Image: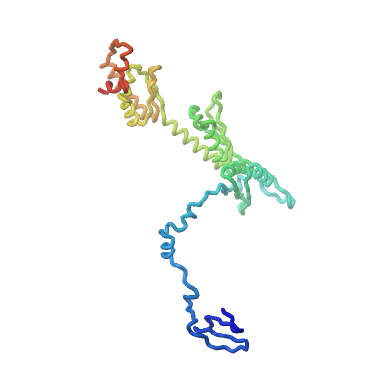
Amino acid sequence: VTCESGVVAVPGGSGDADAAVSEGGASSSASSSNTFSYDEVFPALPEKEALQEMSGGSASNLGQWNQKMHVKSSVITQIFQVPSEERRFHETSSQRFGELGEQAKICADIMRDTNTTIEVSSSKDHSLTVLITGKESNVLVARAAILRHLQTQASASLSIPKEFHRFVLGKSGKNLSKLEQETSTKIDVPRLDENSDVIRITGPKEGIDKACRDIQSMSDERSKLASEKIHVEHIYHPFLSGPYGNTMKALETDTSTRIRLDREKDEVTISGDKDNVARAKEAILKIYEEKKLRCQVVSVEVQKSQHKYILGHRGLQELFEE
């Protein structure tokens, strides 16, 4: 739009020609050389291919920076339900307006202690829907507290061989703590000085069922394992081990067991699956009995200063292999 001597020129009016409007309201045609097409005034946006050429890369490079900037949130939200028949508290009509019930007080205390946000709503079937938001570790603690206080608690007992209790506990009780958090239960494992193999679990029915399954599965897995000790004089240990330990390594690989030689106690310890331990034991005893029949002890006197030449760079393994 241009202004000169009281005349305003407006390009692109109702037609292709410009219109000039004077102060008196008269109009006249402008030169056709000042006309513009729609495409010239409003150019089209560049196509995808043009953007690729401008960026100098492929389409996969577009938005690559945004892909690298994705950051996992440390805050999670977990939703779960408490069935109506397992609710510990139910709203009553005697509760006055604005008065907090026992359930609300418990939730407020848990929110404060765990630094989480808890929302509780009741459905038509009177079941509770609980929504907890916060850091993952805090949410797990809050969930366990909610179920412990708002849901009726059941109990169950599980008989597990005492030698497997240490696997249920884990190092410094870590396995037990993790299982209690995941199932929102309280698990009591007998002390070492107690003559009992019964593990007691208290909590919501769903959590108890899961805890029982996990503990029983752990016990069944461990019960398949065995450890056996065989008396073998240490002078025969090199034949069991083989040159550079190759015989024992091959036997361990073939039987999927772990074999350890104890020269001081003249023992061989085999650990693994029961069937595989039996196979490894049979192979070791076969080597032992064969060497007992075929080998004898011979003493050769060699000055101590010459021992280093007999041992060589890699000990007696090369001579043993020959």
Q: Position of residue 237 (x, y in %)?
A: 34, 20
Q: Looking at the rendering, in which quadrant would you find the N terminus?
A: bottom right
Q: Is residue 190 left or right of residue 106?
A: left
Q: Position of residue 185 (x, y in %)?
A: 57, 38
Q: Quadrant of residue 285?
A: top left
- Residue in front for this viewpoint, 150 or 244: 244
Q: Quadrant of residue 148?
A: top right
Residue at 32 percent across and 25 percent down: it is: 244
Residue at 53 percent across and 87 percent down: it is: 29
Vertical side of 158 occupied by 51: above or below: below
Q: Looking at the rendering, in which quadrant would you find the C terminus?
A: top left
- Residue in front for this viewpoint, 226 or 204: 226
Q: Position of residue 63 (x, y in %)?
A: 47, 57
Q: Is residue 162 left or right of residue 242?
A: right
Q: Is residue 211 left or right of residue 242?
A: right
Could you tell me if residue 78 is visible in this image?
no
- Residue in front for this viewpoint, 59 or 285: 59
- Residue in front for this viewpoint, 222 or 173: 173
Q: Quadrant of residue 145?
A: top right
Q: Is residue 179 left or right of residue 279?
A: right
Could you tell me if residue 204 is visible in this image?
yes
Q: Position of residue 197 (x, y in %)?
A: 52, 28
